[in-house]
Amino acid sequence: MLELDFSLAFDAATDAEFFAALPSKPAVCLVELNDSNAEPLLIRTQDLRRRLQRLLGPPDPTSKRLNLRALARGVRYRPVGSTFEQSLTYYQHAKKLFPQRYRDLLRMRPPAVLKVSLRNAYPRCYVTRHISVDSSGTPTAGSYYGPFPSRGAALAFANRALDFFKMRRCQIKIRRDPTFPGCLYSEMKMCLAPCFAGCSKEEYDAEVERFVKFLESSGESLRATFESERERASADLDFERAATLHKKVEKLDEVLRGRPDLARRIQALDAVILQRGAGDQVVAAYRVEGGRLCEPFFLPFGEIASQPRSAEQIFRNYLDPADDSVGATQLPNGSRNASPNGAEQPGTLRVIEHQLPLAKGELSEHLWLVARWFYSNPRTGEIFFHAKNDWPYRRILRACSRLLAPPEPPKEPSAN
């Protein structure tokens, strides 16, 4: 958990010293009140000193702005280096302090995902914001794919992807009645029509399996099928069929280009998010494993620059739990991760142990945090996905250099 590491007692008689001790930086802050039964105030701000001067400074009798000068006894806060760290910190503490209403405080809405409900005798693909999980927090009752920026984006991708398959799109109960007239998709031969027994149960299950593999492989399974059939048709001198299959490959590429990089099988959503840390020359890494956020760690490049250990090896210790170097990997001088003013940061440079089971709804909450950052505009930081059984460590290190590079000065307007 990202703790509120710093604390200051508040006394209205010495408020000048209190405000001078506060950083003028983005932070998450908890204002504690004199009455132990009173509910504390949890805030997030881009300038902690200025915000608390408004909140705890001398009240303006002509203003209706909230003022806690006569009620506050102190504050606990955490400076943050990025909006993602601020959102995650605020989420964790809001959930701990206000378990009944933290979703309203964050204006949280689960992201849109695609679901293929395998419990249905004749499954279909549809958009949902609810992910069913078992006691260990693992998604159940179907295959989930996402998250998408909106329900409309998820529906548009599903409709275009389903054009390559013959799964049903209707919501009716399948009775396999030969007298049933069928729907428009069955008339256009775009559905196997289980509603009027147009196919066997085995044939429909095989089509569903093809679609699930399409989602799980991000379209690569279907692309491989089309390409192998195209090569076979070319070898058989059936150039007309080869041209048709080539157009299908091009259409598939167009559909996949409209798929966000974040959208993939939820259980296989394995990535690392890199952000600027609050300290000097510090990079924060947030591992996403199966759609769930793991405990982050903070890598101070300024401290390890003169050490024999490489930054790549430190990232390997964090991202590869099966590595032989499992165990605590200390920072230089045997210290843990520390912020610039000496407070201990919440992530050590060691392999994060297996995550505890998530409570009901937490998977959707973690996906919301990740999707909210990923689809934000502008988006700060970078993300890298685990692919082909390895991480792109060189690209991760180059991204760290970009994050730590000083911002470019604004260009002066030309004389013309």
Image (cartoon, rainbow, N blue to C red):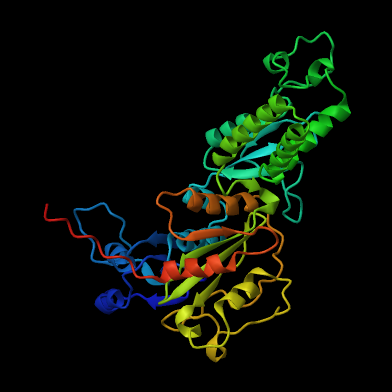
Q: Residue at x 43, y 63 (%)?
A: 82
Work out whether residue 101 can be spotted. no
Indicate left or right for 138 with 108 as reference: right
In this rendered view, identify the residue nearer to me: 76 or 70.
76
Give the residue displayed 33% in from the left and 74% down from the top: 22
Q: Residue at x 29, y 74 (%)?
A: 19
Classify the position of the N terminus by image quarter.
bottom right
Asked if residue 25 lies left or right of residue 146, the reply is left
The mark total stands at 0
Residue 114 in the image, given as x and y percentages of width and height: 65, 38
Q: Residue at x 55, y 58 (%)?
A: 95
Q: Classify 351 as above or below 124.
A: below
Say left or right for 64 vs 300.
left
Is 32 in front, or is 362? Answer: 362
Q: Position of residue 107 (x, y in %)?
A: 48, 47
- Is residue 208 in view from this perspective? yes
Residue 68 in percent (x, y) is at: 33, 63
